[in-house]
Every structure is written in structure tokens, then in C-alpha cells.
């Protein structure tokens, strides 16, 4: 049975449509308004509050905390300075991705780790022989993402301090409404934004302060449908959509290395050791994996033509279609497409593709399966670089 997050007293009052989804055992608002475009526009044009409490959260504390993080993740955590954050995958012994998330260094011997899936057992198994304490604080700590071009104005109003000096992927302690919080310059929208981590018992106080400070800036709550569209435009992958966790995979095809899902830049093979390093080094030595993550730009005229064959206007859903569909080249299936959606800002139909290396270069022409009224067809598409949308303000 799903339960409400620490913000549920506020989000449930705002969710006039009572449209709820499920996220890791919590109620998550799918959409607050009649349609998610209003919430998406708040993310891109104003400011939005997104309840991200269902993320799994862990505190890693002790003399060997840095050694544990470095043992697990593919990046070099020894280079992570205090009050900096990294995004990283972590793998099993075969070099296949178990999960991805962020790691913030809050002190010399203290890290804060987020994950999409439960990871306590994995971290504990990896901590053998180390002097470290791993605390699962998933239920104790609530989290809200404040995202959008006016998010800094809102945060400054709520905290009564300047935030222009907090760099991209940095974090610091602060106080909002008399409550101690951690604020990180992170998010899942590809826009200017922050994530605020607070003890669950004080979550509504922080929400109220952000809401009050945000009213002059047109703040809105945003649900997971709007977040989904924003993250696709930003080229951000999703577990169980673009890849399957190695813990859940039941076939070899469902196992993905970081190099197969666009995370190769986050693999530091110069590190002497981490879980999966040997397998990833062998993969690189073979020339890399047999499939790569790419961006796909679908031709709108092809979509229109498919509807026209049925004497219909192009009734394309504005939701993200996560179920994989085939990608073709010269009449043969060569890969798959996931998370296909209309990008409101980029004004294109886009999605992620998983293709062989010979077809992964930008400009390559392929086609994507599309169905109208039960008739399957193909829509021309071009391979394009990721992300689809790269807003300078997210780093400014």
C-alpha cells in the first residue's frame, strides 16, 4: 500500500484532480492541474516545486567513508571536495549498471548518497573490512526539487540569503523557516534548480516558506508527468526505461554497461579498483559495446502522414512513451527507441535510441515504429547529439 510523503499534507491539498502515481511505495502526484503542460511551463518559465522524497537516501559516515564510495562508484570519489556533488553509476562485478544517483560530500568522513532503488544491502556488502556506518535515511529525510529560471529568486526569498555563489553540483547547509536543511545545486529537469533535503518532521514548514516566497514568481507544484517531459528534453535517462538495473535483468539483453547508456564519461578506469572495473576495461579493449545511447529526432511530417492515412489529425499524446519500440535501417530492425515525447521547448518529437556503433553518429538516418489505429508504420528519424535541450542557465 502506498503512503503519503512528508509533503503529502500540502501536495494532496493542491492536487485537485486527485491524479496519483506510485513511486517507491509513496503517492506521487502525476499531475496537479487539468494537464501537465501548465506544470511543465512552470519548470521552464517560472518556478516549480516537485516532491522527490521517494528517492532512496543514505548517509555514509566514518573514517573509511570515502573508501566505500570509491570502491562502489565508477567515478573517482577521492577527488570529490567537501560540499561538492557528483552524478555517477555503479556496477556489478560484470560491469553492468546496478543503479545511478548522486553522491554529496558533506564532510571529510561524511557522504550523502541517493539512489533510484533500495541499495542498503549492496552498500553493506561492499563495505566489508571498512570502518564505516551506512544509515538508510530514506524515511527520515524528505526532499523537494525547486526548479526553473526563477528558482534562485524563490530560494533567496525563503532563506533570506544570496545563492548566486553556489556552483552547479555544489551543496551547502542553510536554514529555511528556522529549519536546518541541505541545499544542492542539482535536479532532474535540465534547468536552473536546487534540491532541498530536510528532516521529514519539518518538511511542511520548508514547503510553506518556499511557496510563500514563490508566489510573486508564479510558483506551481509539478507532478511526475511534467518532470518526465523535462528530463527527456534534458537528455537524462531513467532506470527501467532507458536501461534495466542489473539486479532486475532476466536476460543478457537487459544488462547494460555505462558505455551503452551514455555514461561512459563517468567511468574512471584510471582508478586502481572499483566494482566492475576489470569487466569495463575488457569491454573498452574490445572497442566498446555493441550498442550506444543516442538521441532520435522524429520527422513530424511522417507522423502527420500516418494519421492522414486514417483521415485523422495528428492526435499525438504529450506524455512520455517509455515502452520500447523498434528502430529500423534498410528494412531491418537495428535497435529500439524509448521515452519518446513531444518537447514543448524544442518543438520536436524526440526519444532515446539504442543503436549499434555504426549507426550512432549524428546525422544517421533511421526509422522508428509508429502505430495509428492499430496500423504499424515507420517514421523517419535522424540521430542527433544529446541533450536535446542544453540551457546555459542551469550552470550559470
Image: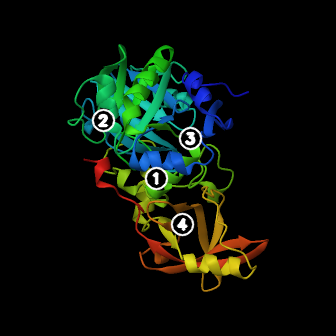
Question: Looking at the picture, does residue 89 appear above or below residue 286?
Answer: above
Disc 4: CA contacts within 10 A as few (<14), some (14-19) or many (>=20): many
Name the mark nearer the viewer: 2 or 4: 2
On the image, the x and y values in percent for residue 98 come to 54, 44
Instruction: Count the labels in the image.
Output: 4
Choose between 259 and 363: the one closer to the eye.
Answer: 363
The disc at residue 236 is 1
Query: What residue does disc 2 label?
Result: 153
* Corner quadrant of residue 157: top left
The crowd level at tag 2 (other Cα within 10 Å; few <14, some 14-19, many 20+) is some
Q: Earlier in the sequence, mark 3 or mark 2?
A: 2
The answer to whether mark 3 and mark 1 are in CB contact below 8 A is no
Residue at the far left in the pictured view: 165
Label 4 and label 3: CA atoms lie apart by 25 Å
Label 3 sits on residue: 223
The reply to whether the C-beta atoms of the residues labelled 4 and 3 are less than 8 Å apart is: no
Name the residue carrying label 4: 353
Amino acid at each position: 500500500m502506498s503512503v503519503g510523503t512528508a509533503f503529502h499534507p500540502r501536495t494532496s491539498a493542491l492536487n485537485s484532480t486527485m491524479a496519483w502515481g506510485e513511486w517507491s511505495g509513496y503517492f506521487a502526484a502525476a499531475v496537479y492541474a487539468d494537464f501537465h503542460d501548465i506544470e511543465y511551463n512552470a519548470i521552464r518559465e517560472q518556478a516549480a516545486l516537485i516532491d522527490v522524497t521517494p528517492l532512496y537516501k543514505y548517509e555514509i559516515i566514518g573514517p573509511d567513508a570515502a573508501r566505500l564510495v570509491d570502491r562502489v562508484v565508477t567515478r573517482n570519489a577521492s577527488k570529490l571536495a567537501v560540499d561538492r556533488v557528483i552524478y555517477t553509476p555503479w556496477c556489478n562485478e560484470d560491469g553492468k549498471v546496478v543503479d545511478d544517483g548522486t553522491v554529496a560530500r558533506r564532510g571529510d568522513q561524511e557522504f550523502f548518497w541517493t539512489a533510484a532503488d533500495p541499495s542498503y544491502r549492496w552498500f553493506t556488502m561492499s563495505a566489508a573490512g571498512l570502518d564505516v556506518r551506512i544509515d538508510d535515511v530514506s524515511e527520515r529525510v524528505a526532499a523537494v526539487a525547486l526548479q526553473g529560471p526563477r528558482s534562485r529568486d524563490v530560494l533567496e526569498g525563503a532563506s533570506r540569503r544570496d545563492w548566486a555563489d553556489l556552483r552547479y553540483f555544489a551543496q551547502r547547509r542553510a536554514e529555511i523557516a528556522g529549519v536546518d536543511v541541505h541545499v544542492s545545486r542539482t535536479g532532474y529537469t535540465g534547468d536552473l534548480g536546487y534540491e532541498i533535503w530536510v528532516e521529514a518532521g519539518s518538511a511542511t514548514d520548508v514547503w510553506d516558506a518556499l511557496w510563500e516566497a514563490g508566489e510573486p514568481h508564479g510558483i506551481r507544484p509539478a507532478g511526475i508527468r511534467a518532470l518526465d517531459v523535462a528530463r527527456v528534453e534534458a537528455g537524462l535517462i531513467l532506470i527501467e526505461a532507458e536501461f534495466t538495473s542489473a539486479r532486475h535483468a532476466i536476460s543478457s539483453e537487459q544488462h547494460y554497461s555505462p558505455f551503452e547508456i551514455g555514461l561512459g564519461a563517468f567511468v574512471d578506469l584510471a582508478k586502481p579498483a572499483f566494482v566492475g572495473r576489470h569487466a569495463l576495461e575488457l569491454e573498452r579493449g574490445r572497442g566498446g559495446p555493441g550498442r550506444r545511447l543516442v538521441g532520435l529526432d522524429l520527422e513530424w511530417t511522417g507522423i502527420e502522414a500516418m494519421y492522414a492515412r486514417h483521415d485523422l489529425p495528428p492526435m499525438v499524446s504529450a506524455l512520455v512513451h517509455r515502452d520500447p519500440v523498434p528502430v529500423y535501417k534498410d528494412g531491418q530492425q537495428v535497435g529500439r527507441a524509448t521515452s519518446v515525447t513531444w518537447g514543448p521547448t524544442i518543438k520536436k518529437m524526440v526519444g532515446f535510441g539504442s543503436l549499434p556503433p555504426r549507426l550512432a553518429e549524428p546525422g544517421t538516418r533511421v526509422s522508428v515504429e509508429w502505430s495509428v489505429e492499430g496500423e504499424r508504420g515507420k517514421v523517419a528519424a535522424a540521430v542527433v547529439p544529446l541533450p536535446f535541450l542544453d540551457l546555459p542557465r542551469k550552470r550559470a
